[in-house]
């Protein structure tokens, strides 16, 4: 309930208004049982029609007003929850966006999806209807107090049964919490299997993995079903017991009330009215107990968000270089893959001058892509430092650094938005003429001309349905929208046709001519021959660094990206 009280604490004015609306609603709810008492004791006994008309008019007015106050309370409850729910959704999504890639990679994909579902569970638990139920609980005492005025004995019976209902509801909620946590964890595994079956459909078909995945899914479904059955049994069992207790309470009240009527200590109207009051007193507590599974899931979801919030996030530092010239330095850099016992590479020390060309070579699995991701600030070295013009990347603003890089990853992926939005993500205000030149430079003109919607074509499946060559061209165009002085290309010609290769070479040549610092992963002899520095990652554990004596073009004082010239 900490979440509930926290929301009220953040909106004290609204909390007070909800309390007032609840007070009026519950006071007006007394009208129905009092109406029954008065009709039986006054109208039935005396048969005065005017009395019945007056009582009926009064109770109808009270019912209408009660409805109005409950509607007002619902609106106020929505206002209390709207901001926290929106913040939770934004926070949960931002965790996925801002957490360091190295930390996020350690979490299975299925568990990452739990962040989104967690926010939905919290919204469900603390919606306006449930807020109203919680606010109604204290007013159970109001109905008990009125019942006490009619008969202290009957009020004592109600108090006893109410306490029993509350205890049973609390015990049920506590037991459900453990099952709920287990169910959420298993849901992560299920999500991962679904992703494998849908996102990697080619692999599933090519290697006849359907039977394998089907068996895994059957086992997982059995676990999920068992947990759901246990939770449902607990919840239904608790509800059944509470309903039975409520029925027993009604029997005790009627039986006790009847003896009091016969003894002349209570009239028939009061006996029937007491039964109605008892039901209204127990109702909010009974409803609250039925929400045990909902609140248990919300508590588990809050715990998930808190655990994810502990993950290290990318630097939001304001440190940056007003004018980055393209210098890059490695100081005793080492990196160890998660779960590995030996470093992928270590003790890499190198000072790359602005305008230099660095080529990274090595066999598959030697760490070429990892090194480019370290340079891009996506990963961090386990030891040592990477500096940009003397500024440690650990201290640099991640947003600033990404804008300094023309980055083409080995396996480019795209966002599920339009092509235009994908290409302008780094520079939304890009000049239309400049944008057109980028499209041409990346060799995308024919592809876009042949697409019915052109730049408005929607990307699906993060671009995996497109050929690698087209994805690379799109990624190249996206990268060229920056004005970065550092170019990082990872196997840029892989998956390219002859025209694509020519486009890459032309782009790299133009960037080098304009004094950009170029870091490229490649085995192409032409690229290697033009390098000032070559890093061979085949040498373990210390990479072999070869520096060549050749002049480095001096970058322009305020160099813009090549296509702006």
Image (spheres, rainbow, N blue to C red):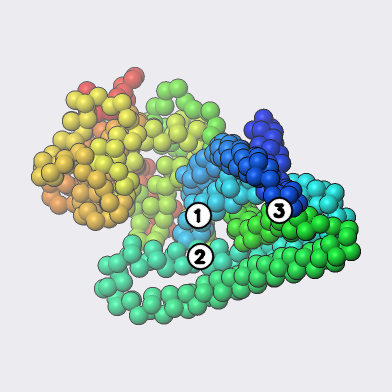
Dot 1 crowding, Cα within 10 Å, few <14, some 14–19, many 20+: some
Discs 1, 2 touching: Cβ within 8 Å = yes
Q: Is residue 17 visible?
A: yes
Work out whether 223 lies above or below 279: below
**Residue 426 at x, y = what percent?**
35, 34
Q: For this view, does 512 lie left or right of residue 117?
A: left
Give the structural element (helix, strand or loop) at label 1.
helix
Q: Residue at x 33, y 30 (%)?
A: 427
Viewer-proximal residue among 205 and 141: 141
Q: Spatial distance from mark 1 to mark 2, Cα to Cα?
A: 10 Å
Q: Is residue 508 visible?
A: no
Q: Residue at x 50, y 37 (%)?
A: 393
**Residue 387 at x, y = what percent?**
49, 36
Give the structural element (helix, strand or loop) at label 2.
helix
Mark linked to residue 156: none
Q: Nearer the viewer, mark 3 or mark 2?
A: 3
Residue that mark 2 sits on: 187
Q: Spatial distance from mark 3 to mark 2, Cα to Cα?
A: 60 Å
């Amino acid at each position: 309930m900490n979440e509930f009280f926290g929301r009220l604490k953040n909106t004290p004015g609204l909390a007070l208004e909800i309390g007032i609306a609840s007070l009026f609603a519950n006071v007006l709810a007394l009208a129905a049982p009092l109406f029954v008492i008065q009709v039986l004791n006054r109208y039935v006994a005396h048969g005065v029609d005017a009395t019945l008309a007056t009582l009926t008019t009064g109770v109808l007015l009270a019912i209408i007003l009660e409805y109005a106050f409950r509607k007002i309370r619902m609106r106020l409850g929505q206002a209390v929850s709207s901001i926290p729910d929106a913040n939770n959704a934004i926070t949960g999504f931002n965790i996925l966006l801002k957490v360091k890639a190295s930390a996020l990679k350690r979490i299975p994909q299925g568990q990452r999806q739990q962040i989104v579902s967690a926010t939905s569970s919290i919204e469900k638990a603390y919606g306006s209807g449930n807020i109203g139920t919680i606010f109604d609980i204290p007013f159970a005492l109001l109905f008990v107090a009125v019942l006490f005025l009619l008969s202290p004995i009957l009020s004592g019976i109600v108090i006893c049964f109410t306490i029993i209902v509350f205890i049973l509801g609390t015990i049920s909620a506590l037991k459900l919490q453990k099952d709920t946590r287990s169910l959420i964890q298993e849901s992560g595994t299920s999500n991962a299997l679904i992703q494998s079956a849908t996102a990697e459909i080619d692999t599933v078909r090519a290697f006849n993995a359907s039977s394998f995945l089907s068996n895994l899914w059957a086992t997982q479904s059995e676990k999920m079903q068992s947990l759901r059955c246990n939770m449902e049994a607990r919840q239904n069992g608790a509800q059944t017991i509470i309903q039975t207790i409520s029925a027993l309470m009604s029997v005790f009240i009627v039986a006790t009330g009847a003896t009091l009527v016969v003894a002349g200590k209570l009239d028939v109207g009061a006996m029937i009215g007491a039964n109605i009051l008892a039901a209204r007193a127990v109702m909010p507590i009974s409803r609250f107990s039925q929400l045990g599974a909902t609140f248990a899931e919300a508590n588990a979801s809050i715990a998930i968000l808190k655990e994810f919030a502990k993950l290290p996030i990318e630097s939001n530092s304001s440190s940056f270089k007003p004018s980055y010239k393209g210098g890059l330095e490695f100081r005793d850099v080492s990196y160890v893959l998660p779960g590995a016992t030996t470093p992928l590479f270590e003790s890499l020390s190198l000072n790359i001058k602005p305008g230099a060309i660095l080529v990274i070579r090595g066999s598959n699995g030697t760490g070429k892509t990892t090194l480019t991701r370290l340079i891009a600030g996506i990963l961090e070295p386990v030891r040592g430092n990477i500096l940009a013009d003397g500024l440690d990347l650990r201290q640099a603003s991640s947003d600033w650094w990404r804008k300094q890089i023309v980055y083409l990853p080995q396996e480019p992926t795209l966002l599920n938005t339009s092509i235009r939005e994908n290409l302008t993500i780094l520079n939304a205000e890009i000049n239309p003429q400049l944008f057109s030149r980028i499209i041409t430079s990346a060799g995308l003109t024919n592809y876009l001309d042949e697409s019915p919607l052109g730049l408005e074509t929607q990307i699906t499946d993060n671009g995996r349905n497109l050929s690698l060559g087209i994805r690379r061209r799109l990624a190249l165009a996206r990268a060229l929208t920056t004005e970065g002085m550092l170019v990082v290309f990872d196997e840029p010609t892989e998956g390219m046709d002859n025209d694509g290769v020519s486009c890459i070479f032309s782009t790299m040549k133009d960037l080098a001519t304009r004094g950009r610092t170029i870091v490229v992963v490649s085995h192409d002899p032409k690229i290697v021959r033009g390098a000032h520095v070559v890093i061979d990652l085949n040498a373990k554990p210390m990479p072999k660094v070869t520096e060549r004596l050749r002049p480095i073009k001096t970058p322009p004082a305020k160099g813009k990206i090549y296509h702006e010239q």
